[in-house]
Amino acid sequence: MNDETVITVEGLVMRYGTAVAVRDVNLAVRHGEVVGLIGPDGAGKSSTLRVIGGLQRPAAGGVTVLGRDAWRHRRAGSRPKPTSWTRCAGTWTRWTCA
């Protein structure tokens, strides 16, 4: 089994103006693991996933996906356009598997 860490989140902070949406999140996901983010509305789940996908820059901390910085190595061409999920099927794979 491969124990390689494929997603690392360290000290992630997200702010929207003066509101702190994500405060000091740390996470390591190894190859083959399945992880879910659960919490109430406004807990920062979507913001965390946007940073992991390279769609949003964190206020502090860092995220690496497959050993590369998620923000610096984002692929502008693979960002989805606002549309329905049925038309975006498979987009997550393109975001994370460059």
Image: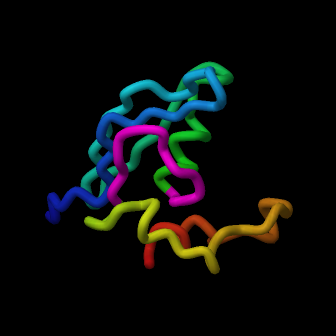
Its colouring scheme is rainbow
> Residue 23: where, in percent of width, then height?
44, 25
Q: Which quadrant is the N terminus positioned in?
A: bottom left
**Residue 58 in magenta?**
yes
Residue situated in front as seen by the camera: 93 or 10: 10
**Residue 70 in magenta?**
no
Name the image quarter holding residue 24: top left
> Residue 65: where, in percent of width, then height?
35, 61
Q: How many marks?
A: 0
Above or below, 39 against 15 in this view is above
Above or below, 61 against 33 in this view is above
Above or below, 15 against 80 in this view is above
* Residue 53 placement, left or right of 88: left
Residue furthest to the front:
17
Q: Which quadrant is the C terminus positioned in?
A: bottom left
Name the image quarter holding residue 40: top right
Q: Residue at x 57, y 26 (%)?
A: 21
Residue furthest to the right:
83
* Residue 95 placement, left or right of 2: right
Residue situated in front as seen by the camera: 17 or 22: 17
Q: Residue at x 35, y 62 (%)?
A: 69
* Residue 13 placement, left or right of 76: left
> Residue 29: where, in percent of width, then height?
30, 49
Which portion, as a residue range, is magenta?
A: 53-64
Name the image quarter holding residue 11: top left
Q: Residue at x 54, y 75 (%)?
A: 75
